[in-house]
């Protein structure tokens, strides 16, 4: 049992931190985001991050969850807006053992040539991954997909989509779910695009008889692959949330030391000190839960689900608490767009939502506990 | 980075699990799970059993009769104890005065007292707080004046838990009047049978009757009762902060017991034919509690990992104390909620049987209120973290 990064992971974490300091200045945030993600994506490809979690058989570095955590902390700390988790963590997990086409897409991901989004949830299904009403029907050797996917995290600019669709059974059966890979330009696919309050770019999909879909490994029992992939993505987001929380807390602490009101630093007021302490404790809890979940990813499904859902719930709660307190302790400037603080809160709100908010995961944790 | 035990640690876990698999009476269960201490005679018997196995002092170095265990072994030991519904060891001798004696005490003191602590031959109580010195401990007024080869102690101590059963008390007393209040305070050991020591129980809201006031009137103790040097009592007390992080860590590990208490009560109780634990509202509250306990326990693992590497754990000890007290309060409240209407049946007026877990769940909920007050209140813990870790 130990909680220390190895030397390579320290180097990785430091390189992300340096890149964040060099490129992602909080004060220039508007300009950086407006430039678009393409150039920065090339930077990240050059730095080798995009291939980190890809298997070595497809041009990747074969990095594990702790390596991903080392990168994600920095993405969170510097609030880098990028589709990294969707493309480089979730997509490879869903594409693994998915055949030749999937292998080629993974190679493209590593080279920075393709963005991939995953459409896994639907209207009326909450965040439940097994509630799939979209259908995939096979006729004359071709799969034909019909239905809609409510939200694709970071999917607005995707070149490829991976969607779940039902090949058998009722809308809430755990079996009978397949995974399909389709190009963004497929006939019958409508991609509706949205910007969120944290500047990420998402999508909603309509599937109207799409025939260009390529089936991935399992066409009737993909749910275990989907939940395992989503759990990896969640762990990456936990590390991002923790990095963001710590950055927001650090900035707030600095502000308490320097901001003068009533002739003294506001950090001399006990009411504010105690709030700051509660933020520091929330950061500690989030880091502990991030470790605990990430280091449980190799466990059997039940134990893994419980660890990840418990962590997702607590990190979401802690992240929103820290973000809100950071805004409050900064006062008016905390509310402004100019200061980085409000961007941390906005990101925490969206991180809570990504792959299911705290309450959803509390319920999943409870289910796993009853079964345990 | 990994959270898995190695083969030697798994073997150790199995050995500990085997030990805890017997000798724990079932009538201890509800009390222990509710975070309540067993009766002193039960705790003494328990300590003697551990001592006979060589496990009397899990956190002490071997040189002083301890186990010399690693932080991971301590974690395993406490986890297994918690899992078996075993009680926590009584800490005032083992964790509070013992380590001060082996760090600062004379050879004679070590030879006499340390084995007696491990063997539970002496029960120790802590004479720190006073009516005018609570969170502001440096305001203490109890005096120890030299008279020949004795100190003569005069003053009043308060919230001295288990003073009525204790054989020995460690007392902070003023041996000199200095400009700085923290100076001139000494740590002195007092035999509770010494003439002039008078104990008066304090009734508390949990009806536990474990704490007391101690009046010290011309109590004469030999000069050799002084621990270390005169005027250094405050500094020695700071050693406790390091030890207290281990007490807080152990407490946090034992929180799994209250989870089982809640779970059993909520499984037993049915409302409209459905077990309470199956109801989504209650299940969500229990899940939230368990999740927060998991977070705290992982913080404890990090604390222990720091200790194993000799790294400074900064404010984590205070954070663990603070969060543990919040969670023991939340947990016992949820347990009380799970019991339902019969939580009102605290004591039988005639001879009727109480509901299962009663009165302990409610008594635990009441007792839990003091956990955020003693050992440095939650507000003091926040002050400590703000000052030491955040430099505010």
Image (cartoon, rainbow, N blue to C red):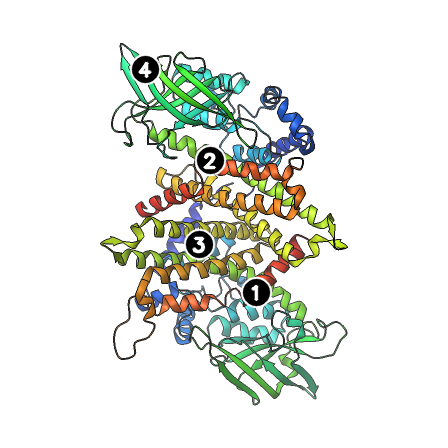
Above-or-below relation of A25 to A256? above
Q: Chain of mark 1?
A: B
User: Residue A359: where, in percent of width, then height?
Assistant: 42, 43
Question: Where is mark 1, residue-wise?
Answer: B377
Q: Dots 1 and 3: beta carbons under 8 Å?
A: no
Question: Where is mark 4, residue-wise?
Answer: A144
User: Residue A355: where, in percent of width, then height?
Assistant: 44, 34
Residue depicted at 36% across the width and 38% down the height: A300
**Circle on res. B76:** 3
Q: Is residue B392 visible?
A: no
**Circle on res. B57:** none
Choose the circle earlier in sequence order: 4 or 2: 4
Query: Distance between the Cα atoms at labels 2 and 1?
Result: 36 Å
Q: Dots 4 and 2: beta carbons under 8 Å?
A: no
Few, some or many C-alpha atoms within 10 Å of disc 1 (few <14, some 14-19, many ≥20)? some
Q: Element under label 1?
A: loop
The reply to whether label 1 and label 3 mark residues of one chain is yes
Give the side of residue B14 with respect to residue A52, left or right. left
The nearer-to-camera label among 4 and 2 is 4
Q: Chain of mark 3?
A: B
Residue depicted at 35% across the width and 12% down the height: A211
**Circle on res. A234:** 2
């Amino acid at each position: 049992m130990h909680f220390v990064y190895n030397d390579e992971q320290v180097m990785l974490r430091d390189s992300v931190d340096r890149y964040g300091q060099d490129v992602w200045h909080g004060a220039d945030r508007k300009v950086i985001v407006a430039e678009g993600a393409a150039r920065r994506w090339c930077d990240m490809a050059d730095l080798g991050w995009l291939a980190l979690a890809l298997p070595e058989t497809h041009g990747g570095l074969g990095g594990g969850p702790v390596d991903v955590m080392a990168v994600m902390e920095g993405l969170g700390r510097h609030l880098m807006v990028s589709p990294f988790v969707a493309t480089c963590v979730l997509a490879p997990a869903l594409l693994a053992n998915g055949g030749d086409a999937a292998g080629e897409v993974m190679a493209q991901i590593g080279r920075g040539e393709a963005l991939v989004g995953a459409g896994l949830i639907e209207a009326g299904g909450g965040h439940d991954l097994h509630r799939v009403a979209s259908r995939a029907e096979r006729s004359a050797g071709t799969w034909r997909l019909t239905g809609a996917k409510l939200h694709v995290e970071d999917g607005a600019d995707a070149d490829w989509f991976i969607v779940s669709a039902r090949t058998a059974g009722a809308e809430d059966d755990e079996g009978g779910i397949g995974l399909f890979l389709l190009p963004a330009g497929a006939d019958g696919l409508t991609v509706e695009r949205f910007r969120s309050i944290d500047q990420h770019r998402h999508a909603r999909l309509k599937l109207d008889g799409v025939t260009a879909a390529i089936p991935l490994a399992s066409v009737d029992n993909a749910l275990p692959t989907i939940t395992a992939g989503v759990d990896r993505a969640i762990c990456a987001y936990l590390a991002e949330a923790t990095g963001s929380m710590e950055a927001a807390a650090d900035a707030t602490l600095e502000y308490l030391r320097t901001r003068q009101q009533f002739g003294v630093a506001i950090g001399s007021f006990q009411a504010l000190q105690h709030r700051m302490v509660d933020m520091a404790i929330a950061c500690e809890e989030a880091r502990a839960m991030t470790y605990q979940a990430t280091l449980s990813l190799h466990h059997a499904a039940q134990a893994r689900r419980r660890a990840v859902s418990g962590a997702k719930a607590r990190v979401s709660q802690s992240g929103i608490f820290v973000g809100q307190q950071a805004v409050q302790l900064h006062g008016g400037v905390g509310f402004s767009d100019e200061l980085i603080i409000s961007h941390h809160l906005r990101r925490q709100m969206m991180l809570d939502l990504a792959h299911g908010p705290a309450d959803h995961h509390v319920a999943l944790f409870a289910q796993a506990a009853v079964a345990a | 980075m990994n959270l898995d035990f190695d083969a030697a640690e798994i073997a150790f876990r199995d050995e500990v699990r085997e030990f805890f698999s017997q000798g724990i009476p079932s009538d201890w269960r509800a009390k222990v799970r509710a975070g309540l201490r067993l009766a002193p005679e039960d705790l003494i018997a328990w300590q003697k059993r551990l001592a006979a196995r060589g496990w009397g002092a899990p956190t002490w170095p071997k040189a002083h009769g301890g186990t010399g265990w690693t932080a991971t072994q301590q974690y395993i030991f406490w986890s297994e104890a918690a899992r078996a519904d075993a009680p926590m060891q009584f800490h005032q001798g083992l964790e509070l005065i013992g380590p001060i004696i082996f760090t600062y005490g004379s050879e004679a003191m070590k030879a006499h007292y340390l084995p007696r602590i491990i063997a539970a031959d002496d029960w120790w109580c802590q004479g720190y707080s006073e009516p005018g010195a609570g969170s502001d401990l440096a305001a203490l007024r109890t005096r120890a004046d030299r008279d020949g080869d004795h100190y003569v102690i005069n003053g009043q101590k308060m919230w001295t838990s288990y003073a009525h059963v204790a054989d020995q008390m460690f007392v902070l007393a003023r041996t000199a009047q200095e400009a700085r209040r923290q100076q001139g305070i000494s740590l002195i050991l007092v035999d509770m049978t010494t003439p002039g020591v008078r104990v008066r129980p304090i009734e508390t809201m949990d009806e536990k009757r474990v704490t007391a006031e101690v009046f010290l009137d011309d109590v004469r103790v030999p000069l050799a009762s002084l621990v270390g040097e005169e005027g250094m009592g405050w500094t020695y007390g700071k050693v406790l902060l390091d030890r207290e992080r281990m007490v807080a860590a152990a407490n946090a590990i034992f929180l799994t017991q209250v989870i089982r208490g809640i779970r059993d009560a909520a499984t037993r109780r049915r409302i409209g034919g459905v077990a309470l634990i199956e109801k989504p509202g209650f299940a969500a509250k229990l899940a939230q509690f368990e999740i927060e306990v998991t977070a705290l326990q992982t913080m404890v693992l990090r604390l222990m990992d720091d200790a194993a590497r000799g790294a400074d754990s900064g404010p984590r000890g205070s954070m663990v104390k603070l969060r543990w007290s919040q969670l023991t309060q939340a947990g016992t409240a949820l347990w009380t909620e799970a019991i339902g209407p019969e939580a009102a049946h605290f004591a039988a007026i005639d001879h009727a049987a109480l509901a299962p877990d009663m009165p302990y769940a409610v008594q635990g909920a009441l007792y839990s209120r003091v956990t955020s007050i003693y050992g440095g209140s939650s507000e003091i813990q926040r002050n400590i973290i703000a000052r030491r870790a955040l430099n505010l």
